[in-house]
Amino acid sequence: MAFTYKPRGVCSQAIILDLDGDTIKKAEFIGGCSGNTQGVARLVEGMKARDAIEKLEGIKCGPRPTSCPDQLALALREALEKANTP
């Protein structure tokens, strides 16, 4: 299932996810700190979405109340909810 999420409060403009059930096949950030977002995206590929959410949720970027990893956790939550809605 392909899913696009618009992050809020961070530099990246979009997060594109491809899930196979509850497993992250691919994650891609559009914009943001290129090296960091590429690294986070590669690290979560192959992980169960709920495991990634657990690890990434609540991470902050400096004084901001959120971060690209935190927004990825929100994107994954939303994608899982959408997948489970009839």
Image (tube, helix red, strand yellow):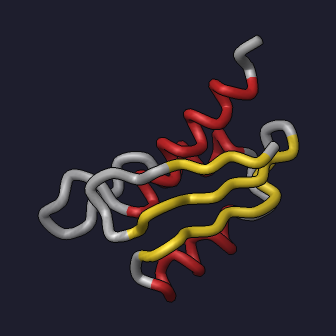
42 to the left or right of 36: right
Query: Residue at the spot x=76%, y=48% of the render?
Result: 2
60 to the left or right of 40: left
Of residues 18 and 64, the one nearer the viewer is 18
Q: In the figure, 41 relative to 58: above or below? A: below
Q: How many marks?
A: 0
Query: Residue at the spot x=67%, y=63% of the render?
Result: 27
Single out the residue that lies furthest toward the bottom.
Answer: 35
Residue 43, percent across and down?
66, 70
Of residues 37 and 53, the one nearer the viewer is 37
Residue 47, percent across and down?
75, 55
50 to the left or right of 13: right
Q: Quadrant of the C terminus?
A: top right
Give the quarter of the image for residue 32. bottom left
Residue 67, percent across and down?
34, 61
Residue 18, percent across and down?
77, 53
Single out the residue that lies furthest toward the top.
Answer: 86
Q: Quadrant of the N terminus?
A: top right
Of residues 44 and 18, the one nearer the viewer is 18
Query: Residue at the spot x=55%, y=59% of the render?
Result: 15
Give the quarter of the image for residue 61. bottom left
Single out the residue that lies furthest toward the left.
Answer: 63
